Amino acid sequence: MKIKKNIMRIISILCIIICCSCYHKTSSKYVLIISKQINNGGFITINQSKKICFKTDTNLLYTSLYFKENDFLKKFDSLDCTPYESFFYVFNNNNISFILIWETQYEHFSVTNAYLLRDDLLFKIGELEIVENCNSCEFYRFPIKELAIKEESNNIEFMFSRDVRYKIGKPDEQIIQAKRLLYIYEIQNRTLKVEKQ
C-alpha cells in the first residue's frame, strides 16, 4: 500500500513538473556583435548572405539604408543627411534573429531607429526616442552601452540600465530613471509601444 502511494506521489509530481514546463515563458537575451561608424557605400555583413549598406544621394539630402540579400540590393529606410556621425549596431539572439540599430546624430539631438531581421525578412521596429541623460554633453547620444534587449514570448523588450532622456526637445520630454522605461515590440502585430513604470 505504501509503495502504491509513493508511486502515485511521484506520478503527481512529474505531472506538475510537465505542466509547469509547458507554460514556462521562453526568454532569450540579445548580445551586441557589431558596433560601427557608418561610412557611405560600405557594406556591413550581418551573416553569410545578409548585408546592410548605407548610401547618401548625390544631392546630400538623404542617407538610405539598403538591405542586400543574395545579390539583391533593396532600399529599406531613409533619414535626412547630417554633417555629424552615424552609427550602426547589431545585436544577435542565438543566430535566430538580429536587432539592428541605426543612430544618426544631428546638431541638438539624435534619431535612432531599430529593425528586426528574422527569417530572411527585415522589419522596421520604429524610433527609440531615447538619449543619454547628460547636461554637459556636446552631443546627445543613444545609450547603447546601457541597452538590454530580450525576447520573451512574442515580444522584444528594450530596457536601459541608467537614467535616460525620453523625447528630448519635445514638449513631453522627461528624464526617466534606470529600468523604468520599456519599449515593447509585438512581433506578430509589428507594433512598438512604450511603458513607463
Image (cartoon, helix red, strand yellow):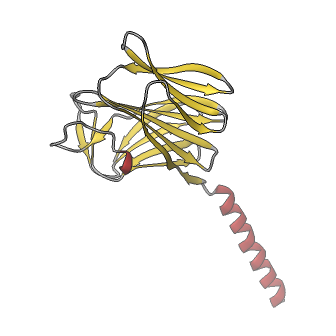
Question: Does residue 6 sit above or below 197 in this rendering?
Answer: below
Q: Position of residue 190 (x, y in %)?
A: 54, 30
Residue at 15 percent of width and 43 percent of height: 136
Seen as rendered, the residue at the extreme left is: 136
Residue 134 is left or right of residue 159, and the answer is left
Give the image location of residue 92, x and y in percent. 55, 46
Question: From where the camera sits, is residue 181 visible?
Answer: yes
Horizontal and vertical percent for residue 183?
Answer: 42, 40
Q: Does residue 189 appear in the picture of this structure?
A: no
Q: Nearer the viewer, residue 125 or 31?
A: 31
Q: Position of residue 196 (x, y in %)?
A: 34, 43
Of 44 and 25, the residue lying toward us: 44
Determine the residue positioned at 19% across, 37% down.
Answer: 138
Marks counted in the figure total: 0
Name, please, the residue furthest toward the top: 59
Residue in the foreground of this view, choosing between 188 and 69: 69
